[in-house]
Amino acid sequence: MADHVALSLHIPEPKTRPGDAPDFSDLKIPGAGLTRRPPIDTREVEMRDLAFDLVRVLDDDGKAVGPWAPQIEPDILRKGLRAMLLTRLFDERMFNAHRQGKTSFFMKSTGEEAIACAQSLAMRRDDMCFPTYRLAGWLMARDYPLLDMVNQIFSNAHDPLKGRQLPILYSARQYGFYTISGNLGSRFGHAVGWAMASAYKGDDKIAIAHVGEGTTAEGAFHEALTFAAVYRAPVILNVTNNQWAISSFQGIAGGEETTFAAKAIGYGVPGLRVDGNDFLAVYAATQWAAERARSNHGPTLIELFTYRVAGHSTSDDPSKYRPKDEGALWPLGDPIERLKQHLIGIGQWSDERHAQLSAELVDAVRRAMKEGEAVGAHGKSKPDPHAMFEDVYKSPDWRLVEQQRELGL
């Protein structure tokens, strides 16, 4: 008989912890412009290598190179840069507002701004985005009113959602922005269903959805992929791999074994892996997947490879589980700085214009903040309590009527 070998359980552990030097030496990052770009009607089985590659456009000098380099008007690039910068400045201001006790909760998008802003500009206005909570840049790119965002975060009397949502869980149908849910995996299924309905009706609108890499370990992710594949739903499914959940690293969700884009292969869905800190690469990959969906070639799964620079939320202290300066050393750089350098390189921007824009945006955020505070912060000036009983059912339910009576409303 063969000797018995004692079994051992593998527990994934990050390479570095607080006090260690950041180490990204194990990352395989190909040069910009080296990944092939297949035609949109290519069969999934013929492009499985893309799930293990990395679509990159901007090189180290800020030049757009390779087959994925999109043809984008400078005005769109400047609009993207403005939206990314506004998102970061707004985040900083609102994060400080939380520390001052003016709001109960906030989440920053630092380092991930290119994802939301590029995709917002690449998609049509009547498409629908089913977002995760680091997608505020989608609204910034579409000129959503800053004051509405501030009032929603403060949950005051002018909150457009009437106090029904946690701060930063925005909802803006006219901007193609479906209600954010803290139960992230649910939005994949909703996006697939929305896209299936659009196709069933013979419409021309498509859906785009987002989850973090941790959510790929949940059943809702796999259920959505099954339906998307079987019915060839016109949907783009994004996995934002920012390396960390609230405290666990991406290896807990299977990132040690393969890429998250490779999860698409088991469903016969194309998987793309994209540099999430490269505005042009995100724009180009989204355009490609959107054109494929609109041409009835079905869904695409995109892994957006990036890094969460800030904490998971105001409830999180990342210094407890990762090296303090890890975000600053992320090898794919800062998305805002990379697009800025590209625009300067093609003669469409300058350091002076950037400084002027920053000053203007800081002023715009400050004014929106003051207006929102004038309506109410610190839990003051709350929404009308009657709103709790509105828009729950098409016709008033007897239980709601009874509850409203008990509250004397």
Image (cartoon, helix red, strand yellow):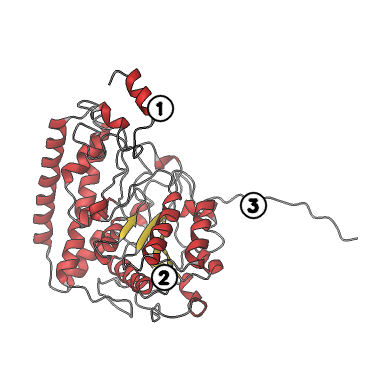
Residue at the disc numbered 3: 10
Above or below 323: residue 337: below
Residue at the disc numbered 2: 54
Q: CA distance from mark 3 to mark 1?
A: 51 Å
Above or below 143: residue 391: above
Q: Are marks 1 and 2 in contact (CB under 8 Å)?
A: no
Q: Nearer the viewer, residue 238 or 194?
A: 194
The quarter of the picture where residue 143 lies is bottom left
Q: Earlier in the sequence, mark 3 or mark 1?
A: 3
Residue density around tag 3, few if under 14, some if 14–19, many if 20 or more, within 10 Å: few
Residue at the disc numbered 1: 399
Q: Nearer the viewer, residue 353 or 276?
A: 276
Quadrant assignment for the C terminus: top left
Q: Nearer the viewer, residue 347 or 169?
A: 169
Quadrant assignment for the N terminus: bottom right
Q: Is residue 375 left or right of residue 288?
A: left
Q: CA distance from mark 2 to mark 3?
A: 28 Å
Residue type (three-letter) at the residue carrying disc 2: Leu
Residue type (three-letter) at the residue carrying disc 1: Arg
Residue at left offset 33%, top offset 50%? 134
Residue density around tag 2, few if under 14, some if 14–19, many if 20 or more, within 10 Å: many
Q: Position of residue 105 (x, y in %)?
A: 32, 36
Q: Position of residue 11 (x, y in %)?
A: 61, 49
Q: Nearer the viewer, mark 1 or mark 2?
A: 1
Report helix, strand or loop for mark 1: helix
The quarter of the picture where residue 311 lies is top left
Q: Are marks 3 and 1 in contact (CB under 8 Å)?
A: no
Q: Earlier in the sequence, mark 1 or mark 2?
A: 2
